[in-house]
Amino acid sequence: MPLGRSDLIELAVIVTPSFNAFATLGFIDPFRAANYLEGRQLFRWRFYSQSGGICVPSNGIGMDCEPLPASAGQTPDIALISSSWTPERHGSKKLQFALQNWARAGATIAGLDTGAFIMAQSGLLKNRRATVHYEHIDAFKESYPDTEVVEDLFAFDGRFASCCGGTASVDFALHILQGICGPALANAASRYIFHPELREHGTWQQPAGAEPLGATVPSVVKQVIRIMEENLEDPVKIPEICSRLGCSHRHVDRLFAQYIKKSPSLYYRDIRLDRARGLVTQTELSMSEISVASGFSSQVHFSRSYKDRFGLPPAKDRVEGRVPFEFRAWPMYGETSRNRNDGQKS
């Protein structure tokens, strides 16, 4: 929608404990740049938290916030909920009430990182498309089966939108800016903040072949990993994978030792356990259900392997693993992930 000279777009940014500050401020910056480049205030934003005061994000740098209004108050044009760890703990009745009322009043409601969990808790995503950070995708699918979950950087469904976080929050904001102000100002803002390549709708969070630092992993290794990631619940034996790809088991073992630093079977076990950990710490599924969903036929074997990898049994990790700190940010693997990402979520 084009802006008139007197129009002012109001953004309400609601943050929860341990939110990702980088992604949240990255979302705001294109709007700041637009204000500067236009020489007038097109956008105004306010930060809220449940009780107000200092809200501490995952990097430890506190942000001063206003308390969420007791009533819905004035409706913002865009309400962004930014959460990260344990989003299910932060979807309070007060927050849900605000989102529901703002949505009824015509606001655009958006979720950042795991913000879509709170949107779904509020009943805003039923039969809609949404995304979250790849680490939480399996948990979201299990928790909200009536929402179509996509592994894209961001998803738009009418007045409801979501983004996986990280640097994608800048792309997300630029698309919103373009929709409001047109491509000229969006392009100018993108140049101003040195974001030269705007990623388009439908861009995957983990695109095949993406190796940002230039490390080259042989195609055979990528193909083996792809088959593994597509078969987490029903594991395929390594010799069968090799047979499908027309290469010898010994050759695959040698490549994994050189590039992955572990055997194919151990790597396969570990990514299944990584998926299990996401389900243990982010859902209320029973341990037997998680064992099956992660490709373990025996719950005893699952528990033993889990403790071997993470240092504590799954039942204990269900409690302690919900403590949001960076050392517990293990990479997760969605059922349809196209490529392994060795980086940790911040």
Image: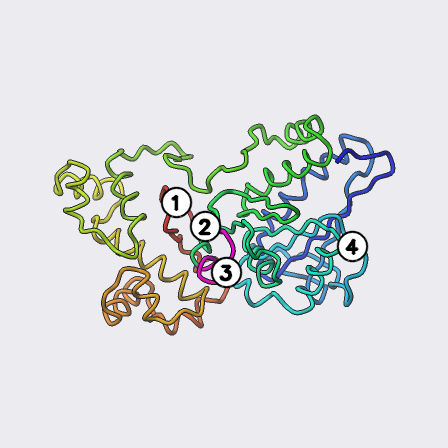
The residue to which callout 1 is attached is 341
Q: Earlier in the sequence, mark 3 or mark 1?
A: 3
Q: Residues within 10 Å of mark 3 (few under 14, many from 20)?
A: some
| Type of the residue with mark 1 | Asn
Residues at circles 2 and 3 in contact by the CB criterion of under 8 Å: no
| Type of the residue with mark 3 | Tyr
Q: Earlier in the sequence, mark 4 or mark 1?
A: 4
Q: Is residue 210 left or right of residue 14?
A: left
Question: Which portion, as a residue range, is magenta?
Answer: 139-149
Numbered label attached to residue 75: 4
- Secondary element at image label 4: loop
Residue 310 lies, in percent from the top left, at 33, 63
- Secondary element at image label 1: loop
* Residue 141 among those drawn in magenta: yes
| Type of the residue with mark 4 | Thr
Which label lies toward us, 1 or 2? 2
Residue in the image at 21% along x and 48% along y: 264
The residue to which callout 3 is attached is 144
Query: What distance separates the C-alpha of mark 4 from that of mark 1?
Result: 39 Å
Q: Earlier in the sequence, mark 3 or mark 4?
A: 4
